[in-house]
C-alpha cells in the first residue's frame, strides 16, 4: 500500500489543499499510515510548543494566554508558515519524510525567512505593476491598484497572521488561484496582474476605454477583467487579417468571423485561436514565456466561449464604430416617357445579359430600378441574374422596399411587385450566409 502511494506522487499532490497544505499533509500521511500515531502526536506537541513561544512574543511576555480566536489565528499562521517552506522546496512525500525526521521549529523558522523573501519579491512586483498601469476608467481596477494592493503591504503581519490577505483587492483577473492565502495569494495575484498590464500596454489606452464603453456604457462601475476583453478583440482582429493592435470590430466584422468559424470543430476552433495568439505575440514581439503561457491559457477559455456562445456576445464593438446610420439620397428619376421606352426595350431583349446592360446604362436611381423590377419586363430565372449583377449596397437598398425588411415574410402590392419581392427573397436564401448577413446588416443601417 505504501509503495503504491509513493509511486503516485502526483496524485498525492493533487489531493492536498493549497490553502491548508500542512494540515492536509498531516491528515493524508496519518490516514495512509505514512505517519504513526506517535509521530503524529509528537508533531502536534511541537506545534503547541511553537504556539506558546509565539503567544509570549504576541503579549510581549506579559501573559501566557490569549483569547481563543487569537490563539486559533496564531495556530493558522504557524501552519501557513510551515506550509510555505514545504511547498516551495519539497514534494509531498519528501515533506512527510522531512517532518518525521526534523525539528518542526527549524522548519517553521525557515518558513519565516522565506516569508520575508517572498514579501521583498512582491514589493518588486508592485513596482513593475505600477510602471505598467493601464490608464482606464474602471473603479475596481483603479482602487485595487492605488489603494487595495498597497494596503496589503501596510497591514500584512508575517509573524502572527501570515495566512491572512489584508487590503481591498476587488479587481478580478482573467486567471488566478483562489485557493491560496497570505503572501502566496498576493504573489500570484501580482504576477498575473503584471502579465495582464504588460499585454495591455501594447494598445492605445483610448482604444481600450472605447472598447470598454462598447461593452457597457457604465463599464467603469463593473467588476470586469479588462485584459480578457482586449485580448478577445485582438484575436478577432487577427481572424479578420488585420493588425492585432486594432480593437475595432464592427457588426459586419462579427458576421464575417461567424462565417469563418461556423463549420469548425471544437479542436479546429482551438487551433485557430492558438494560431491567432502566435500572430499577436509575433506582432508585439512578445518573448516573455510566462506571458505567452498566460495568453495561451486564456485563449483556451475564449475558444470554449466562442464554441458555446454567439459571436455577437464574444467580440465587442467599440462606441467609435462609424457605421451606425447610412443616409441615402436617391438620384433624380428619368421622365415617364423615357422610362416607358427603356422598359419596352428591356422587354424585347433576347437575353438577360442584354437586359442587364440596358439597366446598367440607363437606370441610375433606386426608385427607377424598383419600378423596372415591377414593370413586367424581367421574368422568372432572369431575376436571379439581374440581382447577381448588382452591388451589395444596391441589394441592401432594394430590401428597404420590401414590405417587411426584418423578417421578409409578408407582402402586398401588384402581382408584378409581389413577383420581384419573392424573387429577391429567394435570391437572399440562395446566396451564402455571410453575404446575406452582411447585406441585411447594411440594409438595417440605411435610412432612405
Image (cartoon, helix red, strand yellow):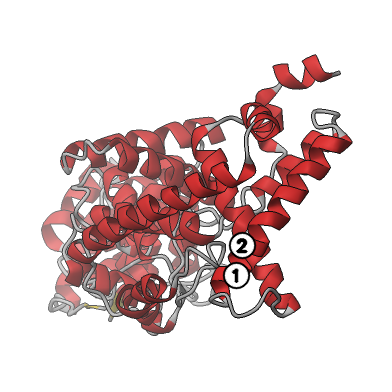
Q: Residues within 10 Å of mark 2 (few under 14, many from 20)?
A: few
Residue 133, above or below 331: above
Task: Determine which quarter of the picture holds residue 4.
Answer: top right
Residue 23 at least partly seen = yes
Q: Position of residue 183 (x, y in %)?
A: 46, 58
Q: Are marks 2 and 1 in contact (CB under 8 Å)?
A: yes
Q: Nearer the viewer, residue 298 or 210?
A: 298
Which mark identifies residue 56? 1
Badge 2 marks a residue whose secondary structure is helix
Residue for point 27% across, 78% down = 325
Q: Which sits in the foreground, 363 or 151? A: 151
Asked if 304 appears above or below 208 in the picture, the reply is: above
Image: 295 above or below 100? below
The quadrant where residue 3 appears = top right
Residue 85, image x, y percentages:
52, 43
Mark 2–mark 1 distance (CA, rounded to whole Å): 5 Å
Q: Is residue 340 above or below residue 179?
A: below
Residues packed near mark 1 inside 10 Å, few (<14), some (14 to 19) or many (20 plus): some
Image coords of residue 264 (percent x, y): 50, 35
392 left or right of 329 in image: right
The residue under the point 61% across, 57% down is 78
Expressed as whole percent of the image width and height from the top left, the position of residue 146 reads 30, 78
Q: Nearer the viewer, residue 368 or 201?
A: 201
Q: Is residue 345 left or right of residue 213?
A: left
In which quadrant of the rendered view does residue 156 lie? bottom left
Viewport quadrant of the C terminus: bottom left
Q: Nearer the viewer, residue 280 or 357?
A: 280
Residue appearing at x 18%, y 47% in the figure: 243
Residue 53 — which label? 2
State which quarter of the image contains the N terminus: top right
Left or right: residue 360 compared with residue 50: left
Amino acid at each position: 500500500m505504501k509503495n503504491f502511494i509513493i509511486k503516485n506522487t502526483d496524485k498525492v499532490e493533487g489531493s492536498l489543499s493549497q490553502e491548508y497544505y500542512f494540515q492536509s499533509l498531516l491528515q493524508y500521511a496519518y490516514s495512509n499510515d505514512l505517519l504513526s500515531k506517535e509521530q503524529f502526536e509528537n508533531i502536534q506537541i511541537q506545534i503547541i510548543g511553537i504556539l506558546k513561544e509565539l503567544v509570549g512574543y504576541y503579549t510581549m511576555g506579559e501573559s501566557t494566554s490569549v483569547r481563543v480566536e487569537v490563539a486559533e489565528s496564531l495556530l493558522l499562521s504557524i501552519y501557513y508558515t510551515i506550509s510555505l517552506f514545504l511547498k516551495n522546496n519539497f514534494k509531498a512525500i519528501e515533506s512527510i519524510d522531512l517532518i518525521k525526521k526534523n525539528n518542526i521549529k527549524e522548519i517553521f523558522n525557515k518558513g519565516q525567512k522565506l516569508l520575508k523573501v517572498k514579501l521583498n519579491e512582491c514589493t518588486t512586483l508592485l513596482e513593475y505593476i505600477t510602471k505598467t498601469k493601464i490608464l482606464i476608467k474602471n473603479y475596481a481596477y483603479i482602487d485595487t491598484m492605488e489603494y487595495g494592493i498597497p494596503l496589503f503591504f501596510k497591514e500584512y503581519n508575517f509573524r502572527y497572521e501570515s495566512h491572512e490577505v489584508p487590503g481591498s483587492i476587488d479587481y478580478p483577473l482573467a486567471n488566478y488561484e483562489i485557493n491560496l492565502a497570505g503572501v502566496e495569494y498576493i504573489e500570484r495575484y501580482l504576477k498575473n496582474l503584471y502579465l495582464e498590464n504588460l499585454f495591455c500596454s501594447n494598445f492605445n489606452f483610448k482604444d481600450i476605454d472605447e472598447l470598454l464603453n462598447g461593452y457597457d456604457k457604465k463599464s467603469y462601475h463593473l467588476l470586469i477583467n479588462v485584459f480578457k476583453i482586449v485580448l478577445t478583440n485582438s484575436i478577432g482582429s487577427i481572424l479578420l487579417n488585420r493588425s492585432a493592435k486594432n480593437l475595432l470590430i464592427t457588426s459586419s466584422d462579427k458576421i464575417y468571423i461567424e462565417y469563418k468559424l461556423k463549420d469548425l470543430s471544437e479542436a479546429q476552433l482551438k487551433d485557430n485561436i492558438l494560431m491567432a495568439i502566435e500572430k499577436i505575440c509575433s506582432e508585439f514581439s512578445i518573448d516573455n514565456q510566462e506571458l505567452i503561457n498566460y495568453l495561451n491559457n486564456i485563449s483556451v477559455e475564449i475558444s470554449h466561449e466562442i464554441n458555446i456562445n454567439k459571436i455577437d456576445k464574444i467580440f465587442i464593438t467599440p462606441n467609435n464604430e462609424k457605421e451606425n446610420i447610412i443616409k441615402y439620397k436617391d438620384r433624380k428619376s428619368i421622365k415617364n416617357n423615357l422610362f416607358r421606352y427603356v422598359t419596352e426595350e428591356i422587354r424585347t431583349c433576347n437575353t438577360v445579359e442584354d437586359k442587364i446592360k440596358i439597366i446598367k446604362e440607363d437606370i441610375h436611381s433606386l426608385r427607377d430600378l424598383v419600378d423596372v423590377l415591377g414593370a413586367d419586363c424581367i421574368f422568372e430565372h432572369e431575376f436571379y441574374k439581374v440581382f447577381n449583377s448588382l452591388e451589395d449596397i444596391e441589394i441592401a437598398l432594394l430590401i428597404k422596399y420590401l414590405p417587411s425588411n426584418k423578417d421578409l415574410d409578408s407582402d402586398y402590392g401588384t402581382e408584378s411587385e409581389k413577383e420581384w419581392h419573392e424573387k429577391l427573397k429567394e435570391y437572399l436564401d440562395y446566396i451564402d450566409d455571410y453575404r446575406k448577413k452582411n447585406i441585411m446588416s447594411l440594409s438595417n443601417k440605411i435610412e432612405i
